[in-house]
Amino acid sequence: MPERRGLTLFHEAGWILLQTPITNQNQWTDMTMAEWHLFDSSSPLDQGAQLWLDMADQQAQEGFQGVDFTQVDILTPVNQYDPDPNGPQELLTLVAPSPEPGTLVLLGTGLLGLLGRKFGTVLKPC
């Protein structure tokens, strides 16, 4: 397996993270171990984690076709240049989807309708 470098590390870790919502929770430990191993080759690696690393490597070789990395945020600590190897770490997280404007309009008009009924105001058509 070729050595992973630079942005590819984050893409592979992001790809693994994007698989968590569609993967059984019993595989999450292996996925986490694989992500840790991407950035620290001395971290433990079992057969399940190796499988996730291999799948991420395959995705990298294929250019991550159709993968939407805008759903992944990288949270960087303020003191990212701390020389302590156990110091601040970056964290990858999934971005929560925001509601579409149409959804907000429907919710808002529904709430206005409920408030109108509660206070006895009925709007009559012209």
Image: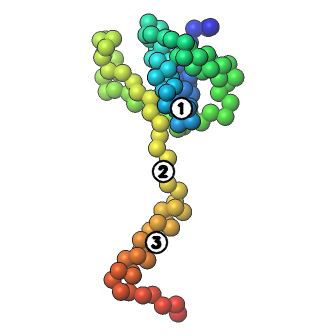
Does the image show residue 98? yes
Give the camera-side residue of 31 and 75: 31
User: Is tag 3's residue or tag 1's residue first in the polypeptide sequence?
Assistant: 1
Please say whether residue 10 is visible from this viewpoint: no
Q: Count of labels shown?
A: 3
Return the disc, 1 or 2, that comes first in the chain's sequence: 1
Residue that badge 1 annotates: 24
Point out residue 7 in the picture as x, y percentages from the top left corner: 54, 21
Q: Identify the residue shown where x is 50% and y is 34%.
A: 72
The label number, if any, that marks residue 110 in the structure image: 3
Q: Residue at x 59, y 17 (%)?
A: 51
Q: Vertically, is 122 above or below 11?
A: below
- Image coords of residue 114 (percent x, y): 40, 76
| Pointer 2 residue | 98
Disc 3 is placed on an element classified as helix
Q: Three-letter amino acid code at disc 1? A: Asn
Q: What element carries label 2?
A: loop
- Image height of 111 relative to 55, above or below: below
2 or 3: tag closer to the N-terminus:
2
Residue 16 is drawn in which quadrant? top right
Q: What residue type is labelled 2?
A: Ser
Q: Quick check: marks 1 and 2 in contact, CB under 8 Å?
A: no
User: What's the amino acid at mark 3?
Assistant: Gly
Cα separation, mark 1 vs mark 2, equals 25 Å
Dot in front, 3 or 1: 1
**2 or 3: mark nearer the eye:** 3
